Image: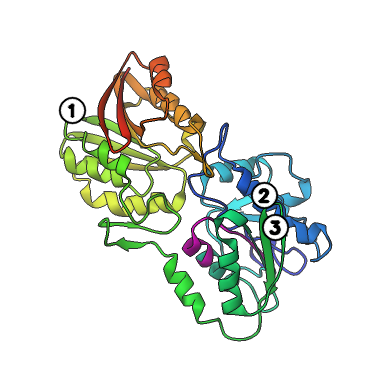
Amino acid sequence: MAGGCGVTAPCYTLLPAGSRHSTPAGGWVTRSAMSIAKALHHPFAAGMLPLPVSGFILNVQADAELPPGLRALICVTGFKPAHNALTAAGFRVVQTLAEADYQAGLCLMTKHKAESLASIAQAWDALPVGGLLVCSGDNDTGVTSLMKAVKEAFGEVESLSKYHARVFWWRKGAGAAPALLADWRAGGAVRPVAATGFTAGPGMHGWNKIDIGSRLLAAQFPGAIRGRVADLGAGWGYLSAELLRAAPGRITGLDLYEADAASLAAAAVNVAPLAGGTVLKYHWADVTAGLPRGRFDWVITNPPFHAGKATDVTLGSQFITRAAEALGSGGTLLLVANKHLPYEAVVDKHFKSRRTVAEADGFKVIEGKR
């Protein structure tokens, strides 16, 4: 029994929770994600399902005071801030789910239907016959549609509504896998996207289209960018790829920083063929936790700015602060943002000079000089 999982120690598989670009004030945990996690635990707390001997799941983000008993559970997440928080809280955390004798799988739904269905298929694949699968999703992000799809594939499920979320559960039957599961696996897969010419997958920011702001930022690359460059919040690599195309031979090193492991892996697929003589480095990292000081000549970034559905500038401000620390004397930041986001004061605080180099389609590109 790998990892200490089995009949005496049920393992709870924490699959993706919330958007990969959830960015509330002061951190990465959204109220929606916390509600989903609370709803997920409710059937156990209410005695509707037997409690696992090693504890119960409270919140995949694990940013607060968690019962010590939860530390024996396996958490699977590719989101670096969650990985760091769970590890600090004493959990055993892994990026990918290994084969083992799992008895239960808890699956937190995201706002991306294809990603959520693929997560359900992954959890179902990992469970033995009779294994318990429990899913929870926010009422505002399509959980009813997901439960309908699950019923179509597996038959009736038990469910309840709590904390502005819905949780539903069933046990794996002895029959063959429902045919729909193959579609769910394929629908959530990372693949070439014809509309963009890049490789990406559901759940990644702008996975099937080029972000308007990023396109505006990329249009500024043919200028003076050269030397060592960092791409903060690199996603699946669009900005880095466009930079290498626009400045062949001028970029000595390019470091991509991204919190989502799957997006970073896709970025490597998209960027590596364009490297030429540029030294590429990929960092699975929470940018807000800090960057090497004074290492870069340029920083490019299109930072996320949403806390669930609400706009929040805290994370973007933290990106700007970390960019300033990472730039050497005379280094330059190129930042794209929605016109209404007030990042100018933060740039003025950390940079010697600032100017707006482009405005279009509701976006602005700000340049800051150290």
In x, y percent, where is residue 328? 33, 20
Q: Colour scheme used in the picture?
A: rainbow
Q: Residue shown at 67%/79% (left/top)? A: 129
> Which residues are the magenta region?
105-117
Q: Residue shown at 56%/33% (left/top)? A: 25
Q: CA distance from mark 1 to mark 2?
A: 47 Å
The answer to whether residue 104 is seen in the rendering is no
* Residue 110 counted in the magenta span: yes
Residue on which disc 3 sits: 40
In the image: residue 114, left or right of residue 361: right
Q: CA distance from mark 2 to mark 3?
A: 8 Å
Q: Which mark is residue 35?
A: 2
Pick whichever, 308 or 351, lies toward us: 308
Badge 1: few (under 14), some or many (20 or more) residues near its Cα, within 10 Å? few
In the image: residue 273, left or right of residue 314: left
Pick whichever, 359 or 225, lies toward us: 359
Q: Amino acid at mark 1?
A: Ala
Q: Amino acid at mark 2?
A: Ser
Mark in the foreground, 2 or 3? 2
**From the viewer's perspective, is residue 303 above or below residue 52?**
above
Residue on which disc 1 sits: 224
Q: Residue shown at 67%/78% (left/top)? A: 156
In the image: residue 45, left or right of residue 284: right
Element marked by disc 3? helix
Of the numbered discs 2 and 3, the one sitting upstream in the chain is 2
In x, y percent, where is residue 244? 21, 42
